[in-house]
Image (tube, rainbow, N blue to C red):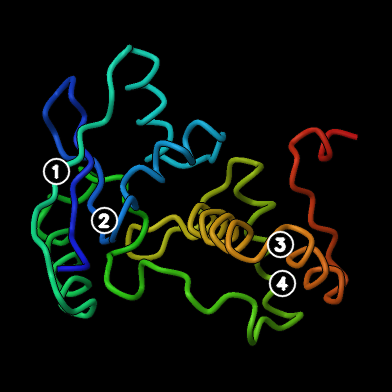
Amino acid sequence: MRFFVYDLIDPRTGETFYVGKGQKSRPSQHTRDAIAGVRSAKCDRIREILAGGAEVKVEIVKRFDKEDDAYRFESARIRSFERGKLTNIACGGRGGKSSAGLAGFTPAMARNLAHALWLHANGYKMLLAGVDLCALARHSLDAVISREGIDRVKKVFSRAGVLLLTEPEQCLS
């Protein structure tokens, strides 16, 4: 069975703090992201666990032959947790994955995304059904950058007339 749904568990409390769908070594990518400095509630929690000398526990909940079955199970599992207990920023399923890359990314989308990122960087939140859209925008952009490469993403923003700053110190000058 190629696909699986997994829990990331805080070994200090035994509580699941993230539910994901993956294959191969996907669960370990979260720790690599946290070490690399990705900013999200999930990565913050992982860094706290690592700083305490522990490791995130990964538990494979269920395995699947079909990816769509795994997505459905992931989404249902996320919904089964009390709101606010998980660090997931999306409700799972195909909606939890940014697979479109840069295809169809319009200048208007780049400007809107840049505005949401500015709000996020300055401590603002835009909530829709309990989801912080600014944090979601940052997470989505990080995913696209890791898949497409920073230079390609900067070109798309540049065509939209938006300067994409990726290092915090760039914003200070």
In three-dimensional space, the C-alpha distance between marks 2 and 4, rounded to whole angstroms, equals 27 Å
Q: Residues within 10 Å of mark 4 (few under 14, many from 20)?
A: many
Element marked by disc 1: strand
Residue 93 vs 83, above or below: the answer is below
Amino acid type indicated by mark 4: Ala
Nearer to us in this view, 62 or 139: 62
Sequence-first disc among 1 and 3: 1
Quote the CA–CA distance across marks 1 and 3. Answer: 36 Å
Q: Are marks 1 and 3 in contact (CB under 8 Å)?
A: no
Q: Secondary structure at mark 3?
A: helix
Q: Nearer the viewer, mark 1 or mark 2?
A: 1
Q: Are marks 3 and 4 in contact (CB under 8 Å)?
A: yes
Q: Of the residues shown, which amino acid type is indicated by label 1? A: Glu
Which residue is tagged 1? 59
Residue at screen point 67% across, 70% down: 112
* Sequence order check, earlier mark of 1 and 2: 2
Residue at mark 3: 114
Circles 4 and 1 in contact, beta carbons < 8 Å: no
Q: Is residue 35 left or right of residue 30?
A: right
Circle 4 residue: 110
Which residue is painted at 50% across and 57% down in the image? 126
Badge number at residue 20: 2
Q: Is 124 or 111 nearer to us in this picture?
A: 111
